[in-house]
Structures are given as C-alpha cells and as structure tokens.
Amino acid sequence: MTNSRGFLENLITAYLNAKQSVIELGYGHEIDWMASLEFDKVDETTFLQEAAWVVLSSGLAERVVRKRFPLVSHAFFDWQSADRIVHERTACRKNALQSFNSPPKINAIIQIATHVYKTGFGQCTSQLGSVAQPT
C-alpha cells in the first residue's frame, strides 16, 4: 500500500512540475484551451486538425509546425471533412508535401482521415470516448 502511495505522489509531483514548465515556457493558453474542451462537442474539422497537428509535431519543434501548418491545412481543404480528403487524397498528398516534406507524416494524416471516413466520425469519437472514460 505504501509503495503505491509513493508512486502516486511521485506521479502527481511529476505532473505538476511538467505543467509548471509548460506555463513558464508560455504555453499556459494551451492548458486553458484543453481544459475548456468538451470532447463530445468536438466536430470533425477540429478532430482532423488536431490529429494532423499531433502527427506533424511528433519529433519537431512547435515553431516549425506552426510556420507550415497553414499551408498543410490548405492542402487538406482546411480539414472540412474526411470525405473530401479521402476523395481528393492524391491532390492533398501532393500539395501537402510541397510545404511539409515528410511522406510518412502526410500519409499518416491521410490514414486518419480514411479511418474517420470509413468508420464515421460519430463512431470514431464514441470509440475514443470509451477509451478515455474509465469503466
């Protein structure tokens, strides 16, 4: 019992230290934004946009992604719908690679849109919601 309590206390301390570092680096607004989100009210456009941001940000500085993200967004029709991305994926891929030359990352974004299109946005969020909610 004592061991798990110590682990939990260490985990909480690590979280609070990380949160403080994020705030000190000037990203407190991101924490506020995330806290204001209601997952069940996220629409398909926001979901696709945020998923793309996560994919592109992996392993890169935020400033690099921020600089190129508007062009990538434009290449993907500003995340209007997974349907449009899937049906025009060749053009999306070609245009996105002109501003963000990482075929694996651009392909991953197309795969996410394809999953949303085939599964349906409602079903995707339902699946994610069930993973996020403890049983």
Image: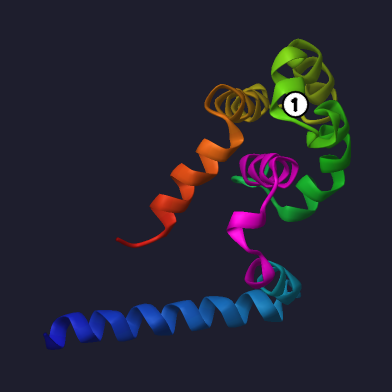
Residue appearing at x 63%, y 63% in the figure: 38
Q: Residue furthest left?
A: 1
Image spot of residue 19 (x, y percent): 57, 78
Residue 80, image quadrant:
top right
* Badge 1 density bin: few <14, some 14–19, many ≥20, Cα 10 Å: few
**Height in image: 83 above or below 10?**
above
Question: Which residue is more in the foreground, 73 or 46?
Answer: 46
Task: Name the residue tied to disc 1.
Answer: 101
Left or right of 14 in this view: 110: right
Image spot of residue 5 (x, y percent): 22, 86
Image spot of residue 22 (x, y percent): 64, 74
**Height in image: 19 above or below 73?**
below
Kind of residue sitting beneath label 1: Asn
Question: Which residue is more in the foreground, 53 or 119?
Answer: 119
Residue appearing at x 69%, y 18% in the figure: 86
Q: Is residue 74 in the magenta section?
A: no
Residue 89, image quadrant:
top right
Left or right of 127 in this view: 41: right
Span highlighted in magenta in the image: 34-55
Image spot of residue 91 (x, y percent): 81, 13
Residue appearing at x 84%, y 27% in the figure: 75
Q: Is residue 53 in the magenta section?
A: yes
- Helix, strand or loop at label 1? It is loop
Residue 93, image quadrant:
top right
In the rendered image, the quadrant that contains the C terminus is: bottom left
Question: Which residue is more in the foreground, 116 or 18?
Answer: 116
Q: Main secondary structure of the magenta part?
A: helix
In the rendered image, the quadrant that contains the N terminus is: bottom left
